[in-house]
Image: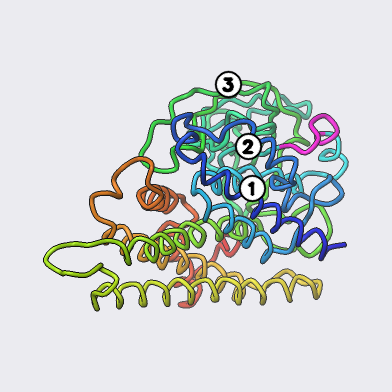
């Protein structure tokens, strides 16, 4: 059964990819993925790649999730990012299973959205509920999200509640879309088609609809849920840069044999410097991709054996995803640099690859702070190992 689901997920991504690519300009003009494509992706199960099977999801192995997102991102960076973030419905695994099942019963096959950053306040009423208020920026997929998973601090009076040995009581609060207000302000350079508007919420949230995934394990059973939260997030994110960079190098190999640039008499593909640039970019990207899948394999072997992967394995995977972004940025920059002025037109995939990848690189998961955590681990000075 798992093998069939895996095959179906990759096939579904490949089947949808041509239309995602063909309608990328439309998505940028709308500033969000067209609704009919959203529903086609939902019907194909692409928003429930990692959602627990008990909740109607596919709960696929991490390597398959990366491959699926890679295919979608190769078609269009905005589409790949949108579907990646929409798989946030998998965070239901950090709720009590019965509570999560109740939410899914109300909204079958939900598309997730939200922002981890604690931009909201949770004020307890003393009777098992919180008053939630906040505004979250960069909320990708907000026009079509069914459930928002938004970060907030629990407050006692005027100050955040502090938990011994863990710091502030930072949680994700799960809120149905009907209780959120989308503030349409997404007008940016890259990932333009992701609908990453601000979202504001003022609502009462039951305590059981909050979770602390940053420091606590998932509440569902199975190997996927033995991955700590930020390691799990990495399995969703890793395919985006790899897919976008692959598209950029594919475009490079297509235009170079037909592109002429004075003073050379022949196409730039005959230029030795261009040949070396492609060779090095291809080698770096393929090496980075292999590193991601190698690190994922080690994580998955540990999880299948019934263990929470240790911090060494998690740190290695973190390093692999950072290297994937670096190699992808290098590949896109090289390809865009040789594309010439023609690539500046809005309908050209090359400039979208350049803009989209540089936008994705701004996500906190790919930040320099994340890279430093690996070094801190190697130097023996990293204490908060839940960040891996």
CA–CA distance in space, label 3 to label 1: 30 Å
Residue shown at the point (78%, 65%) measured from the top left: 223
Q: Of callouts 3 and 2, which one flags the residue occurring earlier in the amino acid sequence? A: 2
* 123 part of magenta stretch: no
Tell me whether the residue at label 3 lies in contact with that at label 1, contact meaning CB atoms closer than 8 angstroms. Answer: no
CA–CA distance in space, label 2 to label 1: 9 Å
Q: Position of residue 91 (x, y in %)?
A: 70, 46
Q: Residues within 10 Å of mark 3 (few under 14, many from 20)?
A: some
Q: Position of residue 69 (x, y in %)?
A: 60, 55
Q: Please give the range of residues in magenta.
A: 103-110
Tell me whether the residue at label 2 lies in contact with that at label 1, contact meaning CB atoms closer than 8 angstroms. Answer: yes
Closer-to-camera residue (128/188): 188
Q: Position of residue 216 (x, y in %)?
A: 70, 54
Residue at image mark 2: 37
Residue at image mark 3: 181
Quadrant housing residue 250: bottom left
Q: State the residue lying farthest toward the left.
A: 263
Residue at image mark 1: 16
């Amino acid at each position: 059964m798992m093998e069939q689901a895996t095959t179906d997920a990759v096939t579904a991504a490949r089947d949808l990819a041509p239309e995602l690519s063909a309608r990328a300009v439309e998505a940028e003009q709308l500033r969000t993925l067209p609704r009919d494509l959203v529903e086609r992706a939902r019907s194909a199960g692409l928003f429930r790649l990692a959602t627990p099977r008990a909740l109607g999801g596919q709960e696929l192995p991490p390597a398959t999730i990366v491959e699926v997102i890679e295919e979608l991102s190769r078609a269009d960076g905005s589409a790949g990012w949108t579907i990646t973030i929409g798989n946030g419905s998998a965070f239901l695994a950090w709720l009590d299973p019965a509570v999560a099942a109740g939410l899914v019963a109300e909204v079958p096959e939900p598309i997730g959205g939200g922002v981890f950053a604690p931009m909201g306040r949770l004020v307890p009423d003393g009777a098992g509920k919180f008053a939630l208020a906040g505004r979250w920026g960069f909320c990708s997929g907000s026009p079509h999200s069914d459930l928002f998973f938004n970060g907030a601090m629990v407050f006692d009076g005027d100050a955040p509640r502090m938990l011994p040995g863990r710091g502030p009581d930072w949680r994700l609060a799960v809120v149905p879309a009907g209780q959120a207000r989308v503030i349409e302000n997404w007008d940016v350079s890259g990932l333009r088609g992701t609908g990453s508007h601000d979202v504001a919420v003022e609502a009462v949230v039951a305590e059981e609809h909050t979770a602390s995934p940053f420091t606590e394990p998932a509440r569902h059973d199975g190997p996927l849920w033995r991955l700590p939260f930020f390691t799990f997030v990495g399995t969703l994110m890793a395919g985006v840069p790899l897919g976008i960079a692959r598209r950029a190098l594919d475009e490079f190999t297509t235009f170079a044999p037909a592109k002429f640039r004075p003073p050379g008499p022949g196409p730039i593909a005959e230029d030795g410097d261009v040949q070396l640039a492609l060779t090095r970019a291809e080698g770096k990207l393929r090496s980075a991709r292999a590193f991601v899948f190698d690190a994922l394999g080690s994580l998955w072997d540990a999880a299948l054996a019934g263990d929470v992967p240790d911090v060494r394995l998690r740190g290695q995977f973190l390093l692999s995803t950072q290297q994937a972004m670096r190699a992808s940025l290098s590949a896109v920059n090289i390809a865009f640099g040789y594309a010439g002025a023609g690539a500046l037109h809005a309908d050209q995939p090359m400039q979208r690859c350049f803009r989209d990848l540089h936008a994705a690189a701004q996500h906190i998961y790919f930040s320099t702070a994340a890279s430093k955590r690996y070094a801190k681990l190697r130097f023996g000075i990293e204490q908060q190992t839940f960040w891996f």
